[in-house]
Image: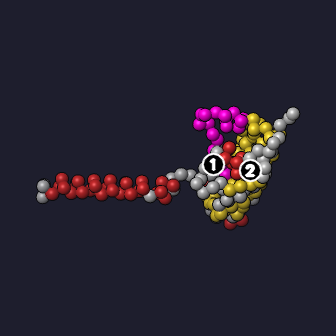
Amino acid sequence: MRKLLPLFHLLMVLVFVENAVSQEKDPSARSQTVPSLLVPDDVVEISVFQEDDLLTKSRLSPSGTIVFPLLGEVKIGGLTPEAATKVIRDLLAKDYLVNPQVTVSVVDYSKRRFTVLGQVQKPGSYEIPDRGEISLLEAIGIAGGYTRIANPSKITLKRIESGKEITYRINAKKMADSRANNSISIKPGDVISVAESIF
């Protein structure tokens, strides 16, 4: 019996290692741990336990807001569903309900889109390719590239982060000329504006 114990322990270790490796190879096992952020055009359903009148299904506006009963306009764009749950729960608890049990779930994801405006050949809204990530310069290329009066050194990028709209001012001319890896990745909901040159 004692001779069998070390063999049994070795077998258990091998089973444990094999399970760990198989989970690592499974992309769905890892992707479940990465929280997704709410973006414009996502449709969310918000429920409050034992408060059927507050059940709401709403599409996020371009600025990342929804309209919720009692609270009015609430900004949840750029947050995870869990963080959005906390925002709504805290607002309800502040003035309206005692210890509200809130659930925020995404019922329809928006297409992963970005918008390019201003001095590009084809201004408009575009889908982020399936490979998942594009740079600012690639996004401008998708929009047909610059017009002849564009000013690549004056580009603004508007993005919803943690429920707030942030504006970045970017010198894409300097970025294109640089050999350094300083490209900016475009996220769903980003709005890029290319300024006009002043002669």
Give the amino acid at mark 2.
Answer: Gly
Residue 134: numbered disc: 1
Residue 144: numbered disc: 2
Q: How many marks?
A: 2
User: Magenta span has 187?
Assistant: yes
Crowdedness near tag 1: few (<14), some (14–19) or many (≥20) residues, C-alpha within 10 Å: some
- Residue 25: name its quadrant: bottom left
In the drawing, does residue 157 fall left or right of residue 9?
right
| Residue 29 place in picture, x, y as percent | 46, 57
* Residue at the far bottom in the pictured view: 52
Question: Which badge, 2 or 1, comes first in the chain's sequence?
Answer: 1
- Residue 52: name its quadrant: bottom right
Q: Residue at x 81, y 42 (%)?
A: 148
Q: Nearer the viewer, residue 123 or 25?
A: 123
Examine the rendering and report whether any part of residue 105 can be seen: yes
Label 1 secondary element: loop
